[in-house]
Amino acid sequence: MKKILCLLTVVLYVAVAAAQQPRTDNKDSTTDLLDEVVVTARRSEQKVMLLPATVNALSRQQLAEAGSRSTPEALMAVNGVFVQKTNHGGGSPFVRGLTGNQVLVLVDGIRLNNATFRYGPNQYLNTIDAFTIQRIEVLKGTGAVQYGTDAIGGVLNIISQDPEFSTGKPQWKGRLAARYMTGDMEKTVRGEVLYSGKRLAMIAGISKKNFGDLIGGDTTGRQSPSGYDEWSFDFKAKYLLKPDIQLIFATQFLRQQSVPVYHKLLLENFAINEMDPQQRLLSYARLHVKGHSRLVSGLQATLSFQQQTEGRNSRKNGSSILRSERDQTNTAGFTIDVSSEINKIWTASTGIELYRDGVGSTRKDIDIQSGATVQKRGLYPDDSRYGNYSLYTLHHFNIGKWTVDAGLRFNTFGIQVTDSSLGRVRINPSAIVGNAALMYQLSNRQTVYAAFSSGFRAPNIDDMGTLGIVDFRYEVPASGLQPEQSQHTEIGYKFKSRNFSGTTSFYYMHLSNLITRVKMEGQTISGYPVYQKENTEAAYIKGIETEVEYRISKQFNLNAGIAYTYGLSLSKNEPLRRIPPFNGRVMASYRDKKWFAAAAFQFAAKQSRLAQGDKDDNRIPVGGTPGWQVINLYGGYQFSVVQVNAGVQNLLNSDYRTHGSGINGVGRSGWISIKLYIN
């Protein structure tokens, strides 16, 4: 910890010195990390420099250049986001030490989280095709007032690419892309068609991917079976009804087939353990209206439907019984957001959000020798209902050098579960949460801020109704659960000069009423210890994040970031479970008119601070997860109508695993992607 504080002191000293350098205009300089414009923090556009919160963003260009295989793996480039992979088809982001249903994921501002989002790491983020993404925004430690339940650790907003209107004649364009990874670890093709007119713009795409078994570092080698197939399609259209009224329609579909859960096959005596299918469908219609009054300067209304389907097949070695499970969650949503520009210093956003989930869950045990089938209760109570209804208001004041943010949200729920062991259970939890932040501009190059926000997570169907094997335990249903609560405090400093920019934040989060799995002593089912969820735990998480960017010249750029997280269970007086280790990333890049090259060094320290739940987790080695260092190289060249990118991953072929993962990271390997632009 002393080394970390010393490093932060040096970073801040250099930063302040740089910030005092005289600024000169440089029209050719590229946008730095604090000049980025994001929408997630306030539900409206704002520069990162002027936000009293920690926000990171990944652009479409960054995603393409780094050659990330999946959306979760792309997030490993975001400072302060740690990605755990239970299997090759998964990937769960940790934000401020929390993951799973304690981090809210949005797609174009629409909730991906639903009534069956699992506690702890899950794979749902991997159902978003990285080819469809325009940018990813990460809001850390806050977001419950802006977006409601689950935003305890923060919010990830995945923003899909937008078709563009034409100012001249209508145009049709196309894009074809192919990607290959050595060892047959990836074979991907993607096609897109784009139309641009003065009033109508459209984009449609289809992707087909084959991911082979993941090949680890110098000791592990091929991890088989871990590969799977995936295909997806997407469509988005914008139509100008009037100059100030725009209608958007979009749909996304992705299906993954036969996704092995590698660690269960390796460690838990399974002959088959896979997700088949893992599938997501999202369709929405959105109306944008530009208002002409102070109270209604803009209005956005969205009607959405989302369907998440998860199938699971499992069979133990030596058994003839194949268990086939299928869960389907249908979510209907309706939201309205009204923007107001009340006067020169006061803007606001006010709205309502209504989501309703219906859960279907089935299971059948099939004797593969006789063909006999027995229908049984699914993982969740069939025909469960989950209603999520809220009203919010956000206000922003700019008074000279001061910025003040404040907001409130009222959220209520209607949850209904009918179960053979619980009977018919109905609960109607509710919560009122608020945030307040104060930012002061020390100069036009430096700001300091302090922020407080409360958050919550209402119990969902996964908490209340799970019956079956989850990870390395057998879980039984629970009733009487109450919402989890959080209080998050953050102080930060942001600076930028002509060539130097950065941010440092210190945060403390108090968690209460946490829903945790409690072991039922002396009880086992099918050889697994029995657990039930209860509101049993209070805890805190504190940490430091810092990121700096130095533009050495117009072409040469250096970026570095580190994150340290410390979590403690106050109830158990032990480390909080699954806390990521100290980690960071350093990247140098060189960019000319047609080509670029980059080198990235990424590391994580050993994590030996383990909760009892970590020690019981067969994915974590005895004594903790070893530290690791990885070097990646990549670059690209733009021909007239062809873009070629290529890279080398894990240059030193290190054998490593991110903390809590069920599969090791990729070893030394190469990849190449080719994109053809058709005009």
Image (cartoon, rainbow, N blue to C red):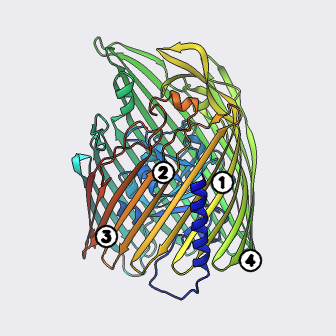
Q: Are marks 4 and 3 in contact (CB under 8 Å)?
A: no
Given residues 60 and 391, the one toward you in this image is 60
How far, Cα to Cα, is label 4 from label 3? 46 Å
Horizontal and vertical percent for residue 196? Answer: 39, 72
Q: What amino acid is at disc 1?
A: Thr
Which element is circle 3 on? strand
Relative vertical location of residue 125 with respect to residue 427 in this rendering, above or below? below
Residue that protrudes farthest toward the bottom in the picture: 24
How far, Cα to Cα, is label 1 from label 2? 27 Å
- The quadrant in which the C terminus is found is bottom left
Nearer the camera: disc 1 or disc 2? 1
How far, Cα to Cα, is label 4 from label 1? 23 Å
Q: Which residue is mark 4?
A: 401
The numbered mark, 4 or 1, whose residue comes first in the sequence reads: 1
Left/right of residue 456 with respect to residue 599 in the rendered view: right
Nearer the camera: disc 2 or disc 4? 4
Q: Are marks 2 and 3 in contact (CB under 8 Å)?
A: no
Q: Which residue is mark 1?
A: 142
Which element is circle 4 on? loop
Mark 3 neighbour density, 10 Å: few (under 14) some (14–19) many (20 or more) = few
The numbered mark, 4 or 3, whose residue comes first in the sequence reads: 3
Q: What amino acid is at disc 3?
A: Lys
How far, Cα to Cα, is label 2 from label 3? 24 Å
Mark 1 neighbour density, 10 Å: few (under 14) some (14–19) many (20 or more) = many
Horizontal and vertical percent for residue 481? Answer: 69, 30
| Residue 634 can be seen, yes or no | yes
The residue at 58%/22% (across/down) is: 531
Q: Which residue is mark 3?
A: 173
